[in-house]
Amino acid sequence: MGEEKKSGGCMGWFIVLIVVGAIALALGLTLKNKFHHGGDDGDAPPVPGPPGAVTQKYGDALKIALQFFDIQKSGKLENNEISWRSDSGLQDGKEAKLDLSKGMYDAGDHMKFGFPMAYTATVLSWAILEYGDQMNKANQLDSAKDSLKWITDFLINAHPEPNVLYIQVGDPDVDHKCWDRPEDMTEKRPLTQINASTPGTEVAAETAAAMASASLVFKSSDSTYSSTLLKHSKELFTFADQHRGSYSENIPQVQQYYNSTGYGDELLWAASWLYHATKDQTYLDYVIGSNGETYANWGSPTWFSWDDKRPGTQVLLSRVSFFDSKAATDSSLKKYKKTAEAVMCGLLPKSPTATTSRTRSGLIWISDWNALQHPVASAFLAVVYSDYMLTSRTRRIQCDSASFSASDLRKFAMSQANYVLGDNPMKMSYLVGYGEKYSQFVHHRGASIPADATTGCKGWQWLDSDQPNPNIAMGALVGGPFLNESFIDLRNNSMQTEPSTYNSAAIVGLLSGLVTTSSVSTSFT
């Protein structure tokens, strides 16, 4: 009996030790999954969760980047905190008995170009939908939504009839013959429209995408406004699809500034957003049917920009493949996802299929003009795709003979963001207002002219001045470096020192994805 009692006691302690060990192991694995980003081959993806602590560098940069939207606002300003800005463009649209006073000026000029402005709204909406919780953690969600609504208010008013859309306010030839503050404009600001007899499919479709994505942003906070946006989006998509024609061909004067290389990508982009906004299978059928065969260019990665929405569409439709098991079996959706992976493989510097279009320091580099557009937009797509992988517990993507994790994509995105914020050979920030060294001669009229100056149209002395801008264009993402990574900070050097609103949307999206870590929602609705 004594031996049995002793044996039973040992067995009891043995069981206790096993239980304690199992608990410790489980706790260790949980902590590893939560805090480790799976950079090694054998690592499991981390357990997604709510937003963690804010990374101060990215949080500070996000707050600054969003301020540029306030600088670019037209119309009667509300709660204006930009000391050198006030009301402007109040008569815009009057010739058509419309209120087109809102919206945003495109860049350093006073033009309202509907094509890139709508793209700005779509990308900003996408950023909010993916990373609204992270923006909120950084106390920037309200600012982002306010800027978005300033654009969508304009887009609603620019669409007075189902088959009529006003796509431009101002004449760029006239506008660019002046150097003045927007508050002091006196030049004529004619309107340009597309309609059934003069179609512009790419602009109508991009505006439909902006409306559909924004309808999702405002769905829970303002259902009436959301419904209005969705109604306009559906009408514009029907208009774009049924009255096909390129605005660049039908309105040749637009070619000098925002020439379109085709409208098929915008049709797929708009239909994809409408599917997310409505869950109407018709829109998904649109992108996986003959239109996909015609326009998707599966298997051929391109660069995401205001003109080419294919990479964005591929990533956006990958979301369906990642999170909708029923739809994921469709062969065409698989082609979108496979092409999205090819885009990612091209971005990863150690991938066998990595693009060689980079500076020596690793910045994606495609063009002298507005060089930062492509790396920032690409990095935004990379961080989004990495979070799709994490949330869906997708371990790796295959790039020919090598495979890469979500952590690898996030590291790439961080490398591009860090370059912008000062980790570059110039040791300067290309985001104005961030860090100690940034452009002092931003090509921007309002920033270059003192608020109390009287210039009329011909304020050229302020363009030619060798003194730094009297006003800081806070949050402006300037054009960026040359391929040799040099940067010439001159106001007349517009290819390097001019900012744009659509670049701001991309950098806001990128920073929002990096500001903290969290899972993404598996559905926008």
Image (cartoon, rainbow, N blue to C red):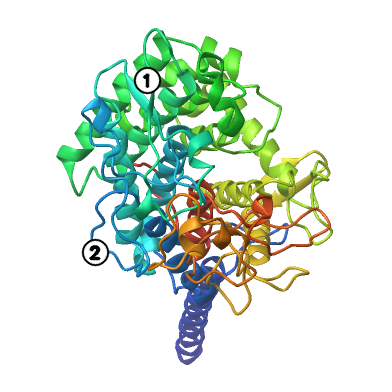
Q: Which image quadrant is residue 203 in?
A: top left
Q: Residue drawn 34% across and 64% down?
A: 136
Residue 309 visible? The answer is no
- Foreground mark, 1 or 2, reads 2
Question: Residue 146: where, in percent of width, then height?
Answer: 29, 54
Residue at the extreme left of the image, as rendered: 224
Seen in the image, is 39 located left or right of residue 201? Answer: right
Is residue 372 positioned above or below 309 on the image? below
Front in this rendered view, residue 305 or 220: 305
Quadrant housing the N terminus: bottom left
Give whichever of discs 1 and 2 has the lower sequence position: 2
State the count of labels. 2
Q: Residue drawn 79% across and 43% down?
A: 355
Seen in the image, is 77 located left or right of residue 112? Answer: left
Mark 2, residue position: 79
Mark 1, residue position: 237
Seen in the image, is 133 located left or right of residue 382? Answer: left
Front in this rendered view, residue 284 or 143: 143
Is the residue marked by circle 1 packed among few (<14), some (14-19), or many (20+) residues within 10 Å? Answer: many
Q: Secondary structure at mark 2?
A: loop
Give the amino acid type for the residue marked by disc 1 in the picture. Phe
- The answer for how far apart the CA atoms under marks 1 and 2 are is 34 Å
Question: Residue 112: where, in percent of width, then height?
Answer: 42, 39
Question: Residue 386: where, in percent of width, then height?
Answer: 58, 51
Give the amino acid type for the residue marked by disc 2 in the picture. Asn
Q: Secondary structure at mark 1?
A: helix
Front in this rendered view, residue 339 or 309: 309
Is the residue marked by circle 2 packed among few (<14), some (14-19), or many (20+) residues within 10 Å? Answer: few
Question: Residue 377: where, in percent of width, then height?
Answer: 59, 47
Residue 363 visible? The answer is yes
Seen in the image, is 223 located left or right of residue 370? Answer: left
Quadrant housing the C terminus: top left
